[in-house]
Structure formats: C-alpha cells, structure tokens
Image: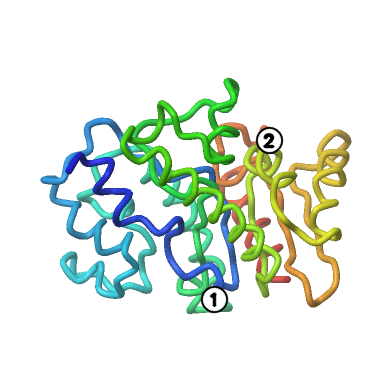
C-alpha cells in the first residue's frame, strides 16, 4: 500500500485528545508529510501509534507522556517543519502547566482537512478551499477520491459541532479562520465572529478574543501564533507565548 494511503488509514482527523472531550481545541489547516516520508523510517512505529490514539505511543522512546505531546519533538523526527511548529506548542504547554499540570491531555489538534496529505498546500490558488469542501483531485490518491469527499464533508460537520460544544477555548490562526469559519455550521453567536474578527484585524491588534456566554466556547483568533516569522517587530517569542497562555488560562 502506498505511504499516503497508509497514513490515511491511521489518521483520525485530529491529534491528541478526542475533540468532543477536549478543553482546548487548536484548529489547524491540515496534517502533511514530506515527499520523502517512508514507512521504514525509525519514527514510523511511534507515529503510527500516536496517530491511532494509543496511550503508549512514546513507550519505545522511554519518555513520559506528560512531557511531550507530539512525535515531532523527538530527536528521531527527521523533518524540520513539524518540529518547529510543535516546539512552540511545547513552550506554551510549559507555561500553562504551571496552573494546570494535565493541560497536554486536555488539548486536541483538529485539522480542517480530514485526511493527511503529502507535501504542502497553497492557499492562493483555491486548493485549500477545494479540499475543505471535499474536492481532492490532485491532492488525494486517485482510487480514494470519492471516499475522501464523504469523509471530508462528515468531518466538516463534526468540526462545527466540536467547536460549538467546546467547554474551554478554541484557538485558530487567522488564515485558517478566514478560510473555514464561514463554511461551518455554527450557532449565530459564533458564526457572526467572522465579520467581527475581520473588522478587528483591519483596525488594531494581533489577536481577536471572543468571550461570550459561559455556555459557549471562548474563541481566540491569532495572526502570529504559532508562526513567529511574521510576529510584530520587537516582540519576543516568549512574550507572545505568555500573552497567548494568559488568554487561554483566563478563560
């Protein structure tokens, strides 16, 4: 079986805690793996166990689950991008763990695209919107195109449900927010955030935080986290993490 199909068979559309049980939802674009990823790599057994949600996914590495949340943080992880992405989250969790030692077990990394992909994606050419709406031509294995559409549309419905029912905080980067939020089935108070956030970013601030009633999730839309290459000049990464951690912890 080709490696892409193998990854699809193990991936659940999210990583970490189950979204319907998580306190914190981190909404991402998609899970992608480099073109040179091979099943024979030493990280494969650990990654496969992690993607399937097994509790003992780190046992082969001799590390405690509570100290690390993703295989990309292991020395054996060979690709630079994923490690940099998740190292930022690791630093965030270190700050949050001061008040909540179990914070890692309460976080779910939910992808906007149900299946993982091989290679990166460009937002400018409409490829991401197509995938989000179930059109996988050119990005998913040919024999699985029809299956992808059904799986993606179900995932999109679930994504709206998970966000609506989240008891804590939903964190989503600005780019992903602009692309997916209007297409989700959300109650009016959450659906209307698209216009409110857009107006906010036009005038001031690098973060838009919606509090709302206690029965609804708090939503944090951030322009710079977890990618710091576009952070405001003079603002250190540690300072940004402290700001984000303060917002999340104060929900």
Question: Residue 167 placed where, x, y %?
Answer: 67, 75
* Image quadrant in which you'd find residue 23: bottom right
Mark sitting earlier along the chain (2/1): 1
Local SS, label 2: loop
Query: Quadrant where the C terminus lies?
Result: bottom right
Q: Which residue is mark 2?
A: 232
At horizontal 36% and vertical 46% (from top left) the residue drawn is 83
Q: Nearer the viewer, residue 26 or 232?
A: 26
Query: Quadrant where the N terminus lies?
Result: top left
Residue 47 appears left or right of 237: left
Q: CA distance from mark 2 to mark 1?
A: 34 Å
* Image quadrant in which you'd find residue 128: top right
Question: Residue 227 placed where, x, y %?
Answer: 55, 40
Q: Are marks 2 and 1 in contact (CB under 8 Å)?
A: no
At horizontal 40% and vertical 38% (from top left) the residue drawn is 145
* Nearer the camera: disc 2 or disc 1: 1
Q: Which residue is mark 1?
A: 21
Question: Residue 61 placed where, x, y %?
Answer: 18, 65
Among all residues in the image, which is located at the extreme top?
125
Question: Residue 64 placed where, x, y %?
Answer: 29, 74
Local SS, label 1: loop
Residue 245 appears left or right of 251: left
Residue 147 appears left or right of 130: left
154 in relation to 58, above or below: above
At horizontal 36% and vertical 65% (from top left) the residue drawn is 68
Q: Residues within 10 Å of mark 1 (few under 14, many from 20)?
A: some
70 in relation to 146, above or below: below
At horizontal 71% and vertical 49% (from top left) the residue drawn is 221
């Amino acid at each position: 079986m080709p490696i892409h199909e193998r990854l699809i068979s193990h991936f659940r559309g999210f990583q970490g805690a189950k979204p319907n049980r998580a306190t914190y939802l981190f909404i991402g674009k998609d899970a992608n793996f480099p073109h040179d990823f091979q099943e024979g790599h030493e990280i494969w057994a650990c990654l496969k166990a992690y993607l399937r949600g097994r509790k003992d996914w780190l046992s082969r590495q001799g590390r405690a689950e509570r100290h690390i949340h993703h295989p990309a943080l292991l020395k054996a992880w060979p690709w630079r991008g994923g490690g940099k992405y998740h190292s930022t989250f690791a630093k965030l969790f270190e700050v949050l763990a001061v008040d909540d030692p179990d914070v890692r077990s309460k976080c779910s990394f939910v992808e906007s695209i149900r299946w993982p992909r091989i290679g990166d994606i460009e937002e400018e050419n409409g490829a991401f919107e197509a995938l989000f709406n179930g059109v996988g031509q050119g990005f998913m294995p040919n024999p699985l195109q029809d299956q992808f559409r059904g799986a993606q549309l179900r995932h999109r419905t679930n994504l709206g449900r998970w966000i609506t029912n989240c008891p804590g905080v939903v964190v989503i980067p600005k780019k992903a927010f602009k692309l997916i939020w209007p297409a989700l089935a959300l109650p009016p108070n959450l659906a209307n955030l698209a216009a409110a956030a857009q107006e906010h970013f036009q005038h001031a601030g690098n973060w838009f935080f919606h509090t709302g009633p206690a029965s609804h999730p708090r939503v944090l839309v951030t322009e710079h986290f977890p990618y710091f290459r576009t952070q405001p000049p003079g603002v250190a990464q540690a300072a940004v993490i402290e700001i984000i951690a303060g917002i999340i912890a104060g929900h």
